[in-house]
Image (tube, rainbow, N blue to C red):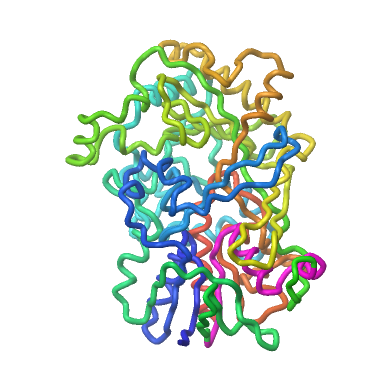
């Protein structure tokens, strides 16, 4: 079989890219996905996303032991189905700050240059103050249908603390607080598969294949000419192969194909095709520390799972099952000298611990303290030449000198907000395992023992104009013709926001870059 373009990975970026490429009826496009169809009910019910973790719809990755986090191996869920992680994330639509994109210093990728792509993909419904969003795009961005009353109280606490209320969260400067916009349509998750693949699959020139685990890219005479799966089946690409496997999958597949650090590849028994030491490096992620409080009022999502609420959701698409859990956010600076927000506080009207895998039994609140611009970075390497083996993921959490200090500053901000009058009836005593108090040593120990990923790995196929970058400004892999990467792995630095929106933007822009050849 031969296609013009093969896109590997039907996640946030891959769905957008394949759909856009297939708009040209003269080209043949194949989109291959290791996971299966997105047919599980919990995918489409917003509040049910933790029920997808550690299932067949999740790659169920783990890091190597992290010395900065009490030597723990952290769980990293990643989507393994159509839509990728957009099918099991918390649906928070947060583009990031102008300073992120302008700070990359990559031609064609400044804030003003990527903004048209955000607007092209967005189909905003509801409020759109200042015309921030696009309104005609395939990806529905909406307001939350039924925010919890404790969430309203949290925003009132932000008002009392003098934190500016943002009319729209996704303007060029996101410093302030707001309800979280969500990628939902009428109370239902709206993933990249919903937005792009549902209409595109009607096209005769687009083939979508699930259950295809790609083992390597076929490279002949320095050019990518196709792919081979774990069963030895091959598919050829007349024009290009594009990797959209995300910040873990794309560097892993490059290395399995002989593109990476030559010394490391030989160590695991792979003959190098292109010596690119940066592949898998520059790994960044957002680390989150939960500040937990008991809630004296029985109004939180702890009591969401009732027959009445189930019926309300099924009949009206209303009620707590429409919650994305992270219902409100604050973007703030740990120090006035910071050029832009470097901390995020996410408010959840429920005790959110252990990724929500253990259902809460008590009413409680969570303020997740997020380090937006970590100094720490890490690397992804191969464990072996076996494509079925999970790679070695080392984010290097808290290896950066100032990261822990800034997290502790964020915990102090969360405590100040929880102590304001608007939250007096909602934020009670500290809830285990959070110790509360102001003892910096105890809070530092708590952070090391309880911090978790916010699910935002980036940078492992870093884009840049320098010779050491993995891909150039047109997303072409240096050292191999006919091969590109288009997903969050190409982000030169992690954004002061969340990564689903930027990943889809990358897919949209990649389509234009490819078509311009």
Q: Is residue 251 magenta?
A: yes
Q: From this viewpoint, is residue 423 visible?
A: yes
Q: Give percent across and percent down for residue 14.
A: 48, 66
Is 346 above or below relative to 396?
Answer: above
Magenta highlight range: 238-266
Residue 392 quadrant: bottom right
Label tally: 0
The quarter in which the N terminus is drawn is bottom left
Q: Position of residue 230 (x, y in %)?
A: 54, 72
Compared across the picture, whether 373 is left or right of 511 comes to right
Q: Against 24, is 433 above or below?
A: above
Please say whether residue 137 is visible from this viewpoint.
Answer: no
Residue at 58% in and 72% down: 215
- Name the spot of residue 105 as percent of width and height, x first: 69, 59
Foreground residue, 142 or 275? 275
Left or right: where does residue 459 sit relative to residue 56? right
Place residue 280 in its image quadrant. Answer: bottom right
Residue 70 percent across, percent down from the top left = 71, 32
Name which residue lies at 49% across and 26% down.
Answer: 366
């Amino acid at each position: 079989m031969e296609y013009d373009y093969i896109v590997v990975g039907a996640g946030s970026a891959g769905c957008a890219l394949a759909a856009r490429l297939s708009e040209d009826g003269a080209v043949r496009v194949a989109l291959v996905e290791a996971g299966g169809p997105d047919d599980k009910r919990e995918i489409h019910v917003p509040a049910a996303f933790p029920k997808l973790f550690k299932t067949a719809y999740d790659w169920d990755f783990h890091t190597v032991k992290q010395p900065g986090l009490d030597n723990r191996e952290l769980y990293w869920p990643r989507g393994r189905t159509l839509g990728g992680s957009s099918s099991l994330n918390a649906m928070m639509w947060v583009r990031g700050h102008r300073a992120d994109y302008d700070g990359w210093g990559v031609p064609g990728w400044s804030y003003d240059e990527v903004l048209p792509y955000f607007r092209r993909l967005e189909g905003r419904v509801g409020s759109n103050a200042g015309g921030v969003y696009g309104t005609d795009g395939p990806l529905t961005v909406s307001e939350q249908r039924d925010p919890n009353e404790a969430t309203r109280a949290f925003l009132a606490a932000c008002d009392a603390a003098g934190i500016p209320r943002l009319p729209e969260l996704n303007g060029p400067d996101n410093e302030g607080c707001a309800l979280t916009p969500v990628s939902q349509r009428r109370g239902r998750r709206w993933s990249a598969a919903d937005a792009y693949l549902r209409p595109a699959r009607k096209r005769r020139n687009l083939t979508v294949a699930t259950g295809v685990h790609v083992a390597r890219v076929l490279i002949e005479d320095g050019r990518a000419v196709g792919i081979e799966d774990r069963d030895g089946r091959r598919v050829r690409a007349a024009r290009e192969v594009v990797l959209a496997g995300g910040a873990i999958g794309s560097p892993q597949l490059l290395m399995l194909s002989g593109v990476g650090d030559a010394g490391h590849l030989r160590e695991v028994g792979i003959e190098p095709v292109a010596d690119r030491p940066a592949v898998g490096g520059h790994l960044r992620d957002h680390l989150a520390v939960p500040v937990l409080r008991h809630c004296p009022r029985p109004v939180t999502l702890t009591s969401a799972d009732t027959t009445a609420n189930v019926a309300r959701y099924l009949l009206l698409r209303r009620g707590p099952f429409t919650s994305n859990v992270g219902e409100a956010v604050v973007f703030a600076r740990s120090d006035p000298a910071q050029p832009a927000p470097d901390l995020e506080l996410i408010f959840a009207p429920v005790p959110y611990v252990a990724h929500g895998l253990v259902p809460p039994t008590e009413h409680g609140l969570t303020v997740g303290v997020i380090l937006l611009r970590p100094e720490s970075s890490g690397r992804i390497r191969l464990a072996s030449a076996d494509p079925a083996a999970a790679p070695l993921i080392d984010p290097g959490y808290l290896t950066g000198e100032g990261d822990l200090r800034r997290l502790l500053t964020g915990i102090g901000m969360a405590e100040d907000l929880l102590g304001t009058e608007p939250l007096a009836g909602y934020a009670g005593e500290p809830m285990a395992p959070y110790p509360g108090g102001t003892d910096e040593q105890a809070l530092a120990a708590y952070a090391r023992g309880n911090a978790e990923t916010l699910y935002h790995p980036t940078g492992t196929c870093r884009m840049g104009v320098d010779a050491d970058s993995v891909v150039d400004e047109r997303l072409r892999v240096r050292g191999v013709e006919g091969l590109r990467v288009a997903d969050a792995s190409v982000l030169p630095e992690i954004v002061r926001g969340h990564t689903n929106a930027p990943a889809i933007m990358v897919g949209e822009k990649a389509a234009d870059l490819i078509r311009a050849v």
